[in-house]
Amino acid sequence: MIGTRPGHRSAPGSVRFLLLLLAAFAGEAPAVSDGAPQSRAQLCVASARSCGLGEMTAILDDGPVAIWWNPGMLAFDRTVRFTGTRSELAKGLADDIVLSTYQIQGGSLAIGPLQVRAALGHTYLSLGSSDIITEGGERVGTFHGWDKLYNLVFSGSYRDALAVGVAYEYTYSRLSPPIPEIGLDYPSVGRANSFSFGLGFRPEFCVLPVDVETPPDAKRTESGLYLSPLLAASVLHLGEGIRYRPDVESEDLPRQVHVGGGLRAAFRPGTKGDLFDLRRLLTWEVLFGYEYDQSLLGPMNIIRHYGLEAKVGGIFSCRYGKIIDKAGGIEGTTKGFGFGIEGLFPVGARLDWASIPQSFFFPRLERWEISLFYDPTILRCAAP
């Protein structure tokens, strides 16, 4: 037998992840009805901003979220950005089950009314160390399991209102090495290729212009109150299945569909065209959104998300949300905040934190995220 330290994906809980591991070790197909590996599951969301918003993903025009959950929305993120996240996935059960992600996205390439962007993402899920114990109770060694995920994303928008995107995904999952002592002659290792597709609709309207002394230059932002309706949809992980051992059947990747909508209201004070314009501190923004996502496998688990976010001055943001996942035993609230310097200068940074519910009787989980970015639009506005 193997003495595992089971990980878990937040929903439907550690039991399902343990079944995945035990089934693979026992020489059977992974017994997970909504696909494998679990690092691509519906609620394995690394972004702290997303987690604070009820783990809503589809409508966020935020590159670190879009790279993994809706490649279409990447086209709306105007920054050049590097982001890293870290999350414990089984707090109170196995503290060495840790999810880390790294994303880098480039600036946009303008082709008439089109804007094209690209990004790379890497996820590493450490499944922790597990003891190898024989039927007689003898401990004969340990091993370390992990998942590695890679995404290459291309996204384009038309007039910064309608966007489409595609992501190529490579999955490399290692659950265990060969363990002859207990009759496992093959490693439990799987590789798979897949694609994800996304759409986004994000027009923006100035509904209440505010008269300020701003030079009449098309490069400069008009001051006023802006409204932006948000609609988005994505289909994830379409492609070949993942086979962990040659003597077992392949398992489908966790195919999902996400559909969401929302509304954003923002006040923008405009700019005089200066590189360092303190009136940007008057910026504020409120976002409300709803998302429905569903597994396309097995019982087709449905999860609903609600999120509310307020940002002030490009410095502070607070978030609140709710998750309803009846199949996973989760119905709880999320919360989070972000702090940094964003949109004030050409370069900036932001630190995000979130707290989300965990299934069953385990404590809440935390997400941490740090972003470094460069906003070329500020330089263009300041250009003579």
Image (spheres, rainbow, N blue to C red):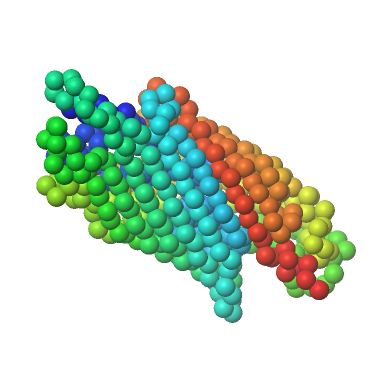
Q: In this view, does 110 lie to the left or right of 154?
A: right
> Image quadrant of residue 129?
top left
Residue occupying the point 23% across, 54% down = 241
Q: In this view, does 369 lie above or below 218?
A: above
Q: Position of residue 51 (x, y in %)?
A: 51, 40
Residue occupying the point 38% across, 39% down = 126
Pick the front one: 99 or 205: 99
Q: Is residue 213 left or right of residue 203?
A: right
Q: Position of residue 142 (x, y in %)?
A: 28, 31
Residue occupying the point 16% across, 44% down = 186
Q: Position of residue 25 (x, y in %)?
A: 19, 36
Q: Is residue 88 above or below residue 383?
A: above
Q: Can residue 231 be seen in this view?
A: no
* Residue found farthest to the right: 213
Residue occupying the point 60% across, 49% down = 371
> Image quadrant of residue 378?
bottom right
Q: Is residue 222 visible?
A: yes
* Residue found farthest to the front: 140
* Residue found farthest to the bottom: 112
- Quarter of the image for the N terminus: give it: top left
Q: Position of residue 363 (x, y in %)?
A: 45, 24
Q: Is residue 383 above or below residue 265?
A: below
- Quarter of the image for the C terminus: give it: bottom right
